[in-house]
Image: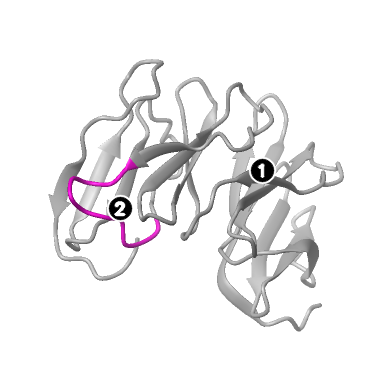
Amino acid sequence: SGSQRIAGNITGCSYGVGTLELFARSADFLMLHNYTANGDAPGDWNSFNGWATSDIHVILNEDPEYVIDVFWRGTDGQVWTRRKVGSRSAWEGQRPLGGMITSNICSARNANSTWVIFARGLDNNLYELRQTEVNGIWPVNAWRLIGAPPNLTILADPYSPAATPTSGLLLERPEIYVVASDHSMWMIRQRPDETYSQSDWVSLGGKVWTGM
């Protein structure tokens, strides 16, 4: 598997003392994993026992222990996830989370340390899926419609600034950025309450022909 041709972006996380986990997909959609510890150089890519039609999105929660969640769009269009708890533990099995998406996945971290993931749906609107408690099991088929800017649709992958316990970007109001069908950049922000509602869309202007 060390000679697999990689398609898309390589994603990953580092934690502990010199531990690095990398993820990618091959040209034939096979999910690949590369693990190294103690600061050693990365080794060969090995099968992660799954198939992805998107980049693999990684969330690392470091408190109170290392919890890694990975997400991807499967060949059925659903979002799938897999979890590892503890730096030396084995990976748990894959689980479908429902939804039918047409983009890569992004995430944001709430002020209460729960996470939310975002993706574009078949109707070119933005959807979200939320954890209900810190390090909680991700719910199945609990996707919530956010929508798109008025009278527009979403063209490309959504984006949210990376927020981790150590990044300094822990936002009380997660922000999501998209390119809409008018080719302008738009932003939406979560309201500072517990209703999970969103503010109105705000146009940032520009003429953008790619994602972010």
Q: Where is 40 relative to 87, above or below? A: below
Q: Where is 182 relative to 84, above or below? A: below
Q: Which mark is residue 178?
A: 2
Q: Position of residue 150 (x, y in %)?
A: 18, 45
Residue type pointed to by label 1:
Asp
- Residue nearest the observer in this picture, 171 or 143: 143
Q: Residue at x 40, y 24 (%)?
A: 196
- Residue nearest the observer in this picture, 120 or 27: 120
Residue type pointed to by label 2:
Val
Q: Specify the quadrant of the image occupied by residue 97.
A: top right
Q: Position of residue 63 (x, y in %)?
A: 65, 26
Q: Residue at x 25, y 30 (%)?
A: 199
Neighbours of disc 2 within 10 Å: few (<14), some (14-19), many (20+): many
Q: What range of the chain is rendered magenta?
A: 147-157
Neighbours of disc 1 within 10 Å: few (<14), some (14-19), many (20+): many
Q: Residue at x 41, y 15 (%)?
A: 194
Question: Which structural element holds mark 1?
Answer: strand
Q: Earlier in the sequence, mark 1 or mark 2?
A: 1
- Residue nearest the observer in this picture, 134 or 21: 134
Q: Quadrant of the C terminus?
A: bottom left
Q: Residue most toward the left?
A: 205
Q: Is residue 40 inside the magenta stretch? A: no
User: Would residue 24 appear left or right of 120 to someone viewing this image?
Assistant: right
Q: Specify the quadrant of the image occupied by residue 31.
A: bottom right
Q: CA distance from mark 1 to mark 2?
A: 23 Å
Main SS of the magenta segment?
loop
Q: Position of residue 84 (x, y in %)?
A: 77, 42
Q: Residue most toward the front?
A: 123
User: Would residue 108 appear left or right of 24 to someone viewing this image?
Assistant: left
Q: Which mark is residue 69?
A: 1
